[in-house]
């Protein structure tokens, strides 16, 4: 953005910024979900070594172990 005297400012402000960057909020929401998934799997791999080393070749077997690990964690919380 440019002021009356021709000096440049930092960029669009307010509603003008929303028009320039409409997809920013979508990107921000996607980033939050991706980071949450990354943190979850990092935490899960710290507790279950077999998931961290990825011994299984098939995706279905790996997914089953992830579900089993989640079940065991939930079971410990419920007990």
Image (cartoon, rainbow, N blue to C red):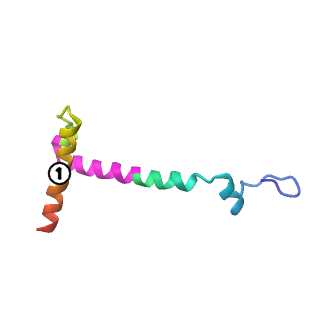
Q: Which residue is mark 1?
A: 69
Residue 51 included in the magenta stretch of the image: no
Tell me where residue 79 sits by quadrant: bottom left
Picture coordinates of residue 52, whole percent (x, y) = 22, 41
- Label 1 CA crowd tier, 10 Å (few <14, some 14–19, many 20+): some
Residue at point 20%, 54% (across, down): 70
Number of numbered markers: 1
Q: Which residues are magenta?
A: 34-50
Instruction: Tell me if 50 is positioned left or right of 29 in this view.
Output: left
Picture coordinates of residue 42, whole percent (x, y) = 28, 48
Residue at point 76%, 55% (across, down): 9
Q: Residue furthest bottom?
A: 79
Q: Residue furthest left?
A: 79
Tell me where residue 57 sits by quadrant: top left
Position of residue 51 relative to residue 37, above or below, is: above
Q: Residue furthest right?
A: 5
Q: Main secondary structure of the magenta part?
A: helix
Position of residue 55 relative to residue 5, above or below, is: above
Residue at point 16%, 56% (across, down): 71
Position of residue 24 relative to residue 76, above or below, is: above
Residue at point 34%, 48% (across, down): 38
Q: Residue furthest front?
A: 60
> In terms of depth relative to the viewer, which is nearer, 32 or 47?
32
Instruction: Tell me if 68 is positioned left or right of 12 in this view.
Output: left
Instruction: Tell me if 42 is positioned left or right of 19 in this view.
Output: left
- Name the secondary structure under disc 1: helix
Picture coordinates of residue 12, whole percent (x, y) = 72, 56
């Amino acid at each position: 953005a440019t002021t009356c005297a021709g000096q440049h400012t930092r960029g669009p402000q307010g509603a003008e910024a929303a028009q320039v960057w409409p997809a920013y909020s979508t990107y921000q929401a996607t980033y939050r979900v991706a980071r949450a998934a990354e943190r979850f799997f990092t935490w899960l791999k710290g507790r279950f070594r077999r998931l961290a080393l990825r011994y299984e070749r098939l995706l279905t077997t790996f997914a089953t172990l992830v579900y089993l690990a989640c079940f065991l964690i939930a079971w410990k919380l419920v007990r």
